[in-house]
Image (cartoon, rainbow, N blue to C red):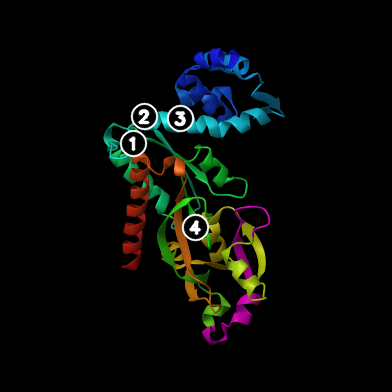
């Protein structure tokens, strides 16, 4: 009976406050996102603590951190919000999303391996069609558990490349690209192409992106390991957009997709070489969870991503 009484005291906005405060790890940031005030959100958090019987958010170091109970309840809160969107937010199948009137926030996690123009073009396209929509663009990195964030509803879309994307997620193939080597214009390999062999490739100094998660090697190094060989990586960087400039000023070799490399040829003294190792092509995907699969706004967002990638691929082919 006590549970029934507590349930009657909960309104939908309180669930949204819970989800936002715990996701943001901050009352002040949650207040900004909810377009509310810090005292109002603090009061609502106090109500939530009393209803749930847990502190929910506690001090940790120089900031705040969710408790174990709060984290365990976050997926349930996301499902409640998703259900409310399906009932009241126009997310039922067949209900058209109207971008010109939309005011929601999309959270997209993306690597910058695809094309240096991809995210700027996507932002421009979304802003043109949905001027009141907000975009949170987050990096795909080893510190970010994108699968958990998709499952909890904190993220709408993840964009990157995988040999085998996670099986529990929906996926859309965006682009398949040839793996090539980007080197400085005066790199010795470019001056002596006949000596550009697999062995010479392995012996060069390589630059590689920081893996997406601890213990991972990445597509290139996983493939080399399966062949029983290893390349010499001397620089790892999470700042992949700066990699071409690093290559242009050194004897480093960057192994990645041709479309990405092509965009930098006019900006830096670089050249593209065929890779002497037979790598499988890079395949880029967008991934999303069942939570947003039937959402008309989610379908609209995924369509914008596909359109931008298709336009970039067409312009790159020219």
Q: Is residue 210 magenta?
A: yes
Q: Name the residue carrying label 1.
A: 92
Q: Name the residue carrying label 4.
A: 113
Instruction: Left or right? Give the position of 54 relative to 254.
Output: right
Q: Name the residue carrying label 3.
A: 81
Name the residue nearer the viewer: 148 or 316.
Answer: 148
Q: Is residue 141 above or below residue 136?
A: below
**Badge 3: residue crowd in 10 Å (few <14, some 14–19, many ≥20):** some
Secondary structure, mark 4, is loop
Q: Are marks 2 and 1 in contact (CB under 8 Å)?
A: yes
Of callouts 4 and 3, the N-terminal one? 3
Q: Looking at this rendering, what residue extends furthest in the bottom direction?
A: 194
Secondary structure, mark 3, is helix
Q: From which residue to which does the magenta span run? A: 192-216
3D distance between C-alphas at marks 4 and 3: 32 Å
Q: Is residue 206 magenta?
A: yes
């Amino acid at each position: 009976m006590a549970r029934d009484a507590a349930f009657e005291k909960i309104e939908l906005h309180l669930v949204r406050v819970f989800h936002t405060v715990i996701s943001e790890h901050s009352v002040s940031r949650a207040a900004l996102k909810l377009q509310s005030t810090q005292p109002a959100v603090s009061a609502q958090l106090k109500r939530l603590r009393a209803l749930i019987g847990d502190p929910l958010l506690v001090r940790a170091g120089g900031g705040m951190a969710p408790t174990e109970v709060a984290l365990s309840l976050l997926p349930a809160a996301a499902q409640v919000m998703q259900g409310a969107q399906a009932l009241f937010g126009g997310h039922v199948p067949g209900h058209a999303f109207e971008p010109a009137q939309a005011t929601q926030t999309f959270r997209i996690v993306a690597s910058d391996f695809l094309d240096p123009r991809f995210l700027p073009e996507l932002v421009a396209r979304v802003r043109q069609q949905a001027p009141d929509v907000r975009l949170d663009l987050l990096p795909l990195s080893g510190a970010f558990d994108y699968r958990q964030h998709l499952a909890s509803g904190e993220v709408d879309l993840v964009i990157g490349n995988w040999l085998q994307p996670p099986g529990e997620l929906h996926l859309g193939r965006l682009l398949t690209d040839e793996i090539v080597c980007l080197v400085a214009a005066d790199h010795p390999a470019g001056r002596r192409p006949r000596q550009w062999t697999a062995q010479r490739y392995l012996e060069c100094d390589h630059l590689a992106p920081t893996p997406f998660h601890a213990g991972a090697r990445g597509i290139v190094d996983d493939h080399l390991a399966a062949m029983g060989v290893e390349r010499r990586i001397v620089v790892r960087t999470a700042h992949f957009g700066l990699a071409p400039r690093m290559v242009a000023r050194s004897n480093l070799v960057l192994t990645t997709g041709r479309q990405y490399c092509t965009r930098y040829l006019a900006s830096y003294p670089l050249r593209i070489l065929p890779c002497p190792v037979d790598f499988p092509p890079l395949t880029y995907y967008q991934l999303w969870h069942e939570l947003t699969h039937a959402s008309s706004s989610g379908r609209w967002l995924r369509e914008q991503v596909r359109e931008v990638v298709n336009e970039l691929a067409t312009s790159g082919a020219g």
